[in-house]
Amino acid sequence: MMDAKLRKALSAWLLGLAVAVSLAGCASLPQDGADAKVMRFDNLRDMRYGEVFLVGGNRLTHNLEAAFYNTTGLNDSADPRNTCPEALWAKVNPEMLKKQYDVLDVFKNGPRHWTMDWIELPVGTERNFDGLKARWMYQVKLPEHINLEAKGYTGYRPTKVERKSQMGFIKGKPVFILDDMKGNPWVMQAYSLIADPSLTYEGLKTLGSKLKLAPGWKYRVQVLDQDLTIKAVDGIAHIVQDDLGNTYDLCAGGSSNFKP
């Protein structure tokens, strides 16, 4: 039989091992939104940008969060319509950044292009990711078992984002809409070049022919007869992506001044 001292030592070792394993699956994110201040960005429609996600939390309990750093308003000295130049974007190394920031994962989200005309939201710390400048814009809890690298994984799966924002779409311009199975409209805030690098702003008019829509979902384009404003309600924005990674905001539950 095992004596008391050995049993105690073994228990302590197992406890230490359990803690070490647990900590290996945990990481804290930088508190880069703590002093965020509201900024407004105008003339955004079809502006190119990119995002870097730092992923932290507890992998073992599937309690994960991602801090989003956005390039809008930066890196644009050569071209004011391009805040995510390809040469700088290509240098961003997720594995190196993962070690530098001691986080669970790093994900490059982009390039993308805005389809809104303006946005106001709190903006936090500016970081330099291998030469690409980006600022903290929001943080989101990730769905359980999410796979950010899997093509189309997030398609037609609504989620919530914690942000105090409002965005605008100007009268006389088109908006690109997903209608869900309940008839709620979701308006595109940005299109993605990740899954389809050939996608263009003009191509959004016929995007419906490319999408593999989930049952009950529809795609349409509408020219606005009045300005549309979409805002986060009580600090929460509801978003969804299609199967090509284009992102839409919900226009329901008081989040918009009307339903397009």
Image (cartoon, rainbow, N blue to C red):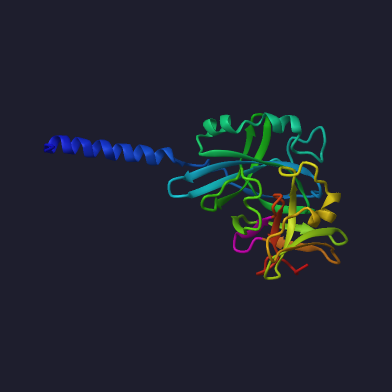
Q: Is residue 19 above or below residue 95?
A: below
The percent coordinates of residue 209 (x first, y second) are: 80, 56
**11 relative position to 60: left or right:** left
Q: Is residue 227 above or below residue 49?
A: below
* Magenta-highlighted residues: 232-241
Q: Is residue 109 magenta?
A: no
Determine if residue 200 is in view. Answer: yes
User: In the rendered image, which quarter contains the N terminus?
Assistant: top left
Residue at x-position 84% and y-position 66%: 226
In this view, the residue in front, 64 or 209, is 209
Q: Would you identify the image quadrant in which residue 125 lies?
A: top right
Q: Main secondary structure of the magenta part?
A: strand
Q: How many marks?
A: 0
Residue at x-position 77% and y-position 41%: 197
Residue at x-position 54% and y-position 30%: 100
The percent coordinates of residue 24 (x first, y second) are: 42, 37
**134 relative position to 42: left or right:** left
Q: Is residue 236 magenta?
A: yes
The percent coordinates of residue 41 (x first, y second) are: 75, 49
In this view, the residue in front, 140 or 164, is 140
User: In the rendered image, which quarter contains the C terminus?
Assistant: bottom right
Determine if residue 34 is in view. Answer: no
Residue at x-position 33% and y-position 40%: 18
The percent coordinates of residue 221 (x first, y second) are: 82, 61
In this view, the residue in front, 206 or 85, is 206
